[in-house]
Structures are given as C-alpha cells and as structure tokens.
Amino acid sequence: MYQYDQIDQSLVDQRVAQYRDQTRRFLAGQLSEDDFRSLRLRNGLYIQKHAPMLRISIPYGLLRPAQVRMLARVAREYDKGYGHFSTRQNMQFNWPKLELVPDILALLATVQLHGIQTSGNCIRNVTADHLAGVAVDELEDPRPWCEYVRQWATLHPEFSYLPRKFKIAVTGSPADRAASRVHDVGLHLVKNEQGEVGFEVLVGGGLGRAPMIGHVIREFLPKKDLLAYLEAILRVYNLEGRRDNIHKARIKILVKAIGPEKMRELVEEEFAAAKDTAPVFDAAEFERIKAFFAPKTYESLQDQDVVSGKPQEFRNWFQYNTRKHKVAGYRAVFLSLKSPKRPPGDITADELDRVADLAEQYSLGEIRSTHDQNVLFAHVKQSDLFALWQQLKLIDLATPNIGTLTDMICCPGGDFCALANARSIPLAEQINERFDSLDYLYDLGEIQLKMSGCMNGCGHHSVGHIGVLGVDKDGEEWYQITLGGSTGGHDASLGKVIGPSVAHDDVAETIERIINVFVEHRQEEERFLDTFRRIGVAPFKAKVYAPAHQAA
Amino acid sequence: MRQLIKQREVIVDEWRYADEDPVGRERALILPFARWKAEREQWWLWDGRLGVRIGPTDPIAELKNDFTRIGLVAIEFGGLAEGRGYSQAALLRSRYKFTGELRAVGKIQRDQLFYMARCGFDTFELPEGADMSVALTAFDDFSVAYQGAFDAAGVHVQRRAVAV
C-alpha cells in the first residue's frame, strides 16, 4: 500500500502544527467558537453529546498493522478503550479531550494517519471497493486512482470551503461495492469500444435528506483527464451550489434543480474552457503511486477443499465470511463486527492489537475497513483459513453473518451523536435478540438492514433493502421503515416508506412481520430485494400495520 | 489609515472605497461591481486608478475586457462558510489573465490566507483589529502542496510542488 514520501509526511506534520496552534488560540480566547468550529471539523473533530468525537481518515479503507496498533493505542490512552468503524471506511473515537487532540494527531502522524478533511464542507475521504485488487470481477485496481485523487483533494486551495461536504468513491468492478451511486461523485473504471480503460463519471448521488441516485454525466472520460474533469465539476459546484440553506447545499440538490443534462453541459463547458490551465496528467507521478499497489507476492498454490471434515460452524463461516480471491489458493476474509455482543462497527483496543497480529500472520500484513462496517483480510491462504477462524473466534470476530440480516449497518445514533433524533444501537440489540437463529438467517438469504438515527443518514437507511430511520415525535423516539433500497451496481434504488413510523420497542417486531411477508411470497431462493420488487409495497403494508392478532 | 497585507508585507492602503471617497479625490477608487457596470464609460477616461469590488454572485466574466482599465479587484468574503471567492480568484488569474492587485476583503481570517494566496490573491484586507503579525505567519503553515497555484502571471505551477 501507499507509503508517504517526504512531501506527504511534511504536509501531515505541518497540519498537526497548524491545528495545535489553532487549538491553542481557541483555548486562549483568540478564536471564536464559530471560527474554530470550521477549523476543527476539517481535522475531524466534532463536538458531540457527551464529548468530542474524532474521526480518523482511512484512505480507501487500507491499513498497515502499525497503523492499527496506533489506533489501539489512541483508543486505550485517549478514549475509553474502543473505536468505531464508520460507513465511509474511517475510524471514530467518541471520548477524546479537545485539548489533547493535537497530541493524538501527532501520534497518528508518526504512522501516516490523520484526520484531515474527515468532516467539514470540503472533499472527504476517497473511498473504494474493499475487494479492490483481489476481486475476480475487477477491470482494474481503483486504489492508485483513489490515492491520486486523495492527494489532489488534500488542502485543495480552491475547494476547501465548498457549499457542503463532498464525497467521492471509485470502483473498478461492475458490482458496485463502494455505494458509488450514492456519492457526490462516483467514478467507475470502464472499457470503451476501442478497448481503452477510462472512467464513467456520475454526479449528484447522496444519502441524508433527499437521498438521490447519481446521474452519469460522462460515459467515458480518458484517464489523463481525471483531475481536470473533477476540477470542472467542483468549480461548477463551488460557484453554483446553494449556500443559503445547509439542507439544500449538496451537489445533488444543484443537479436536481437544474437537471442532469444542464449539469453535464456546465461541467463540459468548464472542462473545455479550463483545458490550458487545469491540472495536467502527471504520468510519472501516477506510475510512482501505482507501484505501491502492485499485486502482492503470492505463493503458487491451488484452490483446495477447505471445508470437508470440518465443523458446520466453520463451514458456515467459510460460506458467509469469505470471498473468492483472484489468485488460486487464497480467499478474502471478513472479520464480522456484527456479533450480537457489540454495537455494529465497534472494536476494542485489545481486539485491534490482535487484528494487527493476525494480519501479519495470515494476510500479508494488510487490513481493510469496509463500508459495511466490517474488517477485511484480503489475502488469506486457504490452508490457513481454519487456523485463522479459530483465532478470530477467540476475539468475537468470527460471527458467520456477513450479508445476512444481522450484518446491519448502524450509525452511533442518539447514544453518542448530537444530531441524532433517536438511538440506533439499542435497535441492533433488539434485532439480534429476535433473530438469534443463524439457520433462519441463512434461509432468508441476502438482506441488507441499514439504520440511521436521523435524516443525515450515516447508517445509509435509504439504500437498505430494509431501512430504519430514527425520527423525533414530541421528544419520543420513533422509526420510519423503508423497503427496497439498494446500492448494488446498475440496479441502485432508494427505499420506499411503507407507512407511519413505529415505536422504539416495536422495531424488531415490525421487521419480523416484514420478513414473514417476504417468506410467504418468496419464490424459491429469491432475494428479499427481488421479492419486494416483484410484489411491491402493498402486501408488506397490510401485514405490518395489521392489529397484532391478525398479523400472526 | 487602513493596514493591509500585500505580498507578505504590512502596508498602508492607498485605495479608497466608493463610500469613503465618492468622487475619487485620492485618485485610487474601488467601485462596487454594479456601479462599475452602470458607469463604466464615464470612469474609463478618468485620470485616477480604478478598482472593482465584487460579491460572491457577481458574474466576473463580465469584467474580462476591462482589465486594461481596472488595476484592482477586491473579492468579498462573508465569512468562513463563503468559498466562491476562491474560484473567482482562480478564474481571474488563470482564465482572464488578470495581473493586477487581487484583494480578499470582508470577514477573512488568518487560517484562510494560505489557501487564498495559492488561488492568486496577493493582498489581504483583514477586519479591523486583526493581529497582522499572527496573520503574516499563515503563509508559512505549509512548505509543500499537492496542487498547482495561480500566481499573478496566471501560471499553473506543477502539482505536488514545494509551496512558494
């Protein structure tokens, strides 16, 4: 993976020094609350319900063991001993002290980590497919492009004070595992008729209030034009995006207001007009970056039968928590952060240390965070799988539920977040209690349950097959249910609200009723999403809102 | 006497805004964009120096044929949340080849100056009472940058460069 050179390291070190001085000026009363807010957010620091929250950037979800150990150290020394993986592959700490954040950032800088642009109205962490570089369906590894874009976006002088946050995701596979269609910009590596590889460019996707699927504004962009084209998009957005209303400031609102065709026209016009001054493709620099993502040195192995004679539990884990690797004899392995015993995405300092050790032993020293809030070991020898599974079981990271209902996405919610209307973590507990039979979960097949504590949609509820959104009604927590959302590939869609919201204690019950309707109408091995698309919302509505005695 | 930072030095402002000097007695007058548009012809032959002050929504492209007459453009910032001025500056320098004084004015503060300078601003009119010595250090916050920069000559410098 990418290693900093002197330029990268200087920039991060100088950023820490700058932020240390900003914190000092704030504490000395020389910077107003408002001015400091905008500066601290750009370094990942929020002021939350109980304490500040610090978000650390994990560029496109890639980590080295030393970085994971440093995250563990920060969790232990500056937090309450745990961290939380977010849906944008970052890590969040919920209990740091504001005045100690410069020290935390200085520590993180020693292992090439930082909090730059993890919040604020600027270009956020560039995310990617967590199976990048190992996926069998991949056209090209998106990560060198992610890093190329990351550098360009970091402290960009023109685009650091945008109308609102700006998120970019890059994928190299037709199966969209990075939710790129619900990003401000989605970049898909595609091949044109001449056999050249370039980018399909989508603009205007987004979750939160008014969720939208992005529109293709360029079917094929030559690779060399990537930064120039991104600058054209950002410049149009920076000048034309609304700034009068925070809820209408995302680029998706601009695209909706003027229409995707007009957006395409404006961007193409700007792109053409800027052709002599826009960033030129730096082939040597790109090759330098690309070399860091060269395929690992794999042993020459054959695929083997891993499961014969092994316990059923291991077979389940193999089936659900591992994925095909493009090199024979290897698998990619999910470490599930969705055991019934933990808030989704949470991991303790001790577990982080253990994960770092195991990655060194079993996954060529590489750790990845996924946008589904799990961890991935991308390069595990098939002959090591059983041993790894046994080790993971000891630290509660082997729950064989990836892709099932309980592999739910969940924001920190009202337990931590100042924005939330309602709690989301207790819902996860409720649902885990109700759906505690793995066999039943397996029978149900692939279901994505996504829960957010408020409209901002950090839990991606709008694109969950089943989405749960916390709303506030006269100070009480209620939950709106949507069905039929999806981030997947070309059939991305937004969920539809099924009816009035339900009370906190009724959420698991409601989901069970929804599942029962699915089971009743399901044809053969149909996915929940496909059943929903076939039969529509009506049968669900009828059962969900029926009085208890009828629903049974 | 208004103080400014110009090309990394503290100087006394020689320019006056129209509300301070309506008829241009000091021979260095900054007009609001709308007034310049309305009175363009009558000021063209005036013997003083002219500048234009633009707001975030003013169409700067309309100034592109005026730079033989206009020696200063002041771009207004309403606060940290206002970011259009960065693009306006970049466009003035790169597309419209404006080589005169490019001034940031309004609610600007120290922590924006590094970015502003790289977008082509060379003069900074900080709010009254701002600590100039603290502000001057902002240009040295970073010795490196991943992007090119626009200087007064409108040149787009190599990315991933040492910041100047």
Image (cartoon, grey):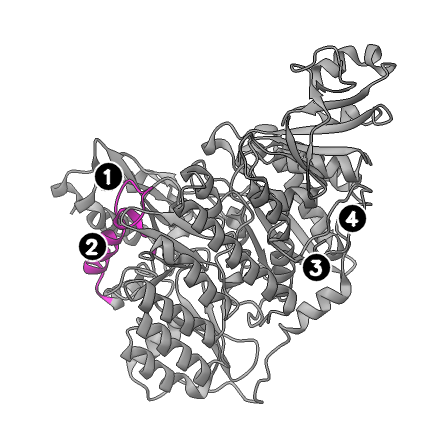
Q: Is residue A401 visible?
A: no
Residue identified by numbered label 1: A478
On screen, residue A271 versus residue A420, left or right, reads right
Three-letter amino acid code at disc 4? Answer: His
On screen, residue A170 versus residue A225, left or right, reads left
Instruction: Judge whether A475 appears above or below A94 on screen.
Output: above
Chain where mark 3 sits:
B
On screen, residue A539 versus residue A218, left or right, reads left
Q: Please state which of the two labelled residues, at mark 4 or mark 1, is closer to the viewer.
A: 4
Residue B160, disc: 3
Instruction: Give residue A539's position: percent from left, percent from top.
Output: 30, 41
Q: Closer to the camera, A443 or A311?
A: A311
Residue at the extreme left of the image, as rendered: A549
Q: CA distance from mark 3 to mark 4?
A: 12 Å
**Tag 3 and tag 1 share a subunit:** no
Three-letter amino acid code at disc 3? Answer: Arg
Three-letter amino acid code at disc 2? Answer: Gln
Chain where mark 4 sits:
B
| Span highlighted in magenta in the image | A409-437
Disc on the earlier residue, 2 or 1: 2
Q: CA distance from mark 4 to mark 1?
A: 53 Å
Residue A430, disc: 2
**Tag 2 and tag 4 share a subunit:** no
Chain where mark 2 sits:
A
Query: What secondary structure is marked by label 3?
Result: loop
**Tag 4 and tag 1 share a subunit:** no
Residue identified by numbered label 4: B156
Residue visible at 17% across and 44% down in the picture:
A551
Three-letter amino acid code at disc 1? Answer: Trp
Q: Please state which of the two labelled residues, at mark 3 or mark 1, is closer to the viewer.
A: 3
